[in-house]
Image (spheres, rainbow, N blue to C red):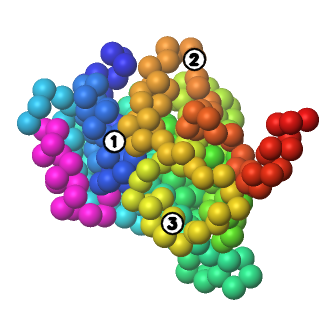
């Protein structure tokens, strides 16, 4: 991580949860963080926990990343004030329970706009800034295990689709960067279930006892995964990292009855 000390990272969705944990961990490693979110009061609380310590500085910017001009304004500020970002962490995301048969268009649009389009706009602006400032930077997309498997719960398939799109877009970015002869890295980190505010909200709706109960990752586990990706030498790229709790599979499976389990074990 020494190569990133005193460099600048932009973290979206940084006011709470995984984004806040990533911002703190980067600052602890001497990285200056521009934390983006819509909730100004929570951003300020985050900065106050770090900026009185011997860490990197956390700058806070209120920004709705689904607003293209707002994103451009932030990158312009980072360019002119801090010399451009070396790291982009696209963490902002949303999960809405919405049926494909009778779901609301608004819910679908919210999912795609944030999980796919906002991520793409931020990645585009990061590429432009890094190229202009001659920075061999690193773009990390906080994807999801839902971008590699089909979530068994009802009403989650639009979220699945948005995260599958992120998986495709990551390799698409690598392809275009290769064609441009760029050394900017693109990594995808796909967590399993993480104990966040978003997952707690979803869990209030989903009561599906037919699947195995999830073990939970901590938010700090994903922050550490980000550090692991960044810590690779310039010639090494972790393209895809799937992070799941020990003792769980990648794909969620149906929970058999206790009698079925006993019969299998006694074969």
Name the residue tied to disc 1.
21
Counting other residues with Cα less than 10 Å from the Cα at mark 3, is it few (<14), some (14-19), or many (20 or more)?
A: few
* Left or right: where 223 falls relative to 45: right
Q: Position of residue 29 (x, y in %)?
A: 28, 25
Magenta-drawn stretch, dominant element (helix, strand or loop)? helix
Q: Quadrant of the N terminus?
A: top left
Q: Is residue 186 magenta?
A: no
| Above or below, comparing residue 225 to residue 237 in the picture | below
Counting other residues with Cα less than 10 Å from the Cα at mark 2, is it few (<14), some (14-19), or many (20 or more)?
A: few
Secondary structure category for the residue under label 2: loop
Who is closer to the viewer here, 119 or 223?
A: 223
Name the residue tied to disc 2.
236
Q: Position of residue 174 (x, y in %)?
A: 64, 35
Q: Are marks 2 and 1 in contact (CB under 8 Å)?
A: no
**Which is nearer the N-term, disc 2 or disc 1?**
1
- Answer yes or no: is residue 44 visible: yes
Q: Nearer the viewer, mark 3 or mark 1?
A: 3
Q: Is residue 37 magenta?
A: yes
Q: Residue farthest to the left?
A: 52
Spatial CA span between label 3 and label 2? 36 Å
* Left or right: where 222 falls relative to 115: left
Q: Nearer the viewer, mark 2 or mark 1?
A: 1
Spatial CA span between label 3 and label 1? 20 Å
Residue 197 has which mark? none
Residue 202 has which mark? 3
Who is closer to the viewer here, 38 or 198?
A: 198
Q: Quadrant of the C terminus?
A: top right
Secondary structure category for the residue under label 3: helix
Range shown magenta: 36-51
């Amino acid at each position: 991580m020494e190569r990133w000390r005193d460099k600048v990272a932009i973290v979206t969705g940084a006011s709470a949860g995984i984004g806040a944990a990533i911002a703190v961990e980067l600052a602890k490693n001497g990285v200056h963080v521009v934390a983006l979110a819509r909730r100004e009061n929570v951003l300020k609380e985050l900065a106050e926990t770090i900026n009185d310590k011997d860490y990197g500085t956390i700058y806070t910017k209120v920004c709705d990343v689904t607003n293209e001009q707002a994103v451009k304004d932030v990158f312009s500020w980072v360019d002119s004030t801090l010399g451009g970002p070396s790291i982009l962490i696209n963490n902002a995301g949303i999960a809405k329970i919405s049926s494909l048969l009778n779901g609301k268009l608004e819910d679908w649009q919210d999912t795609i706009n944030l999980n796919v389009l906002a991520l793409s706009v931020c990645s585009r602006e990061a590429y432009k800034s890094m190229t202009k400032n001659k920075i061999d930077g690193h773009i990390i997309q906080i994807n999801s295990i839902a971008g590699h498997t089909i979530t068994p719960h009802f009403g989650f398939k639009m979220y699945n689709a948005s995260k599958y799109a992120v998986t495709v877009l990551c390799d698409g970015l690598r392809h275009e960067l290769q064609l441009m002869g760029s050394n900017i890295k693109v990594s995808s980190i796909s967590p399993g279930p993480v104990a966040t505010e978003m997952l707690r909200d979803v869990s209030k709706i989903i009561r599906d006892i037919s699947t195995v109960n999830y073990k939970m990752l901590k938010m700090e586990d994903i922050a550490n995964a980000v550090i692991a990706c960044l810590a690779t030498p310039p010639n090494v790229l972790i393209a895809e990292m799937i992070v799941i709790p020990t003792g769980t599979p990648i794909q969620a499976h149906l929970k058999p009855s206790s009698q079925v389990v006993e019969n299998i074990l006694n074969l």
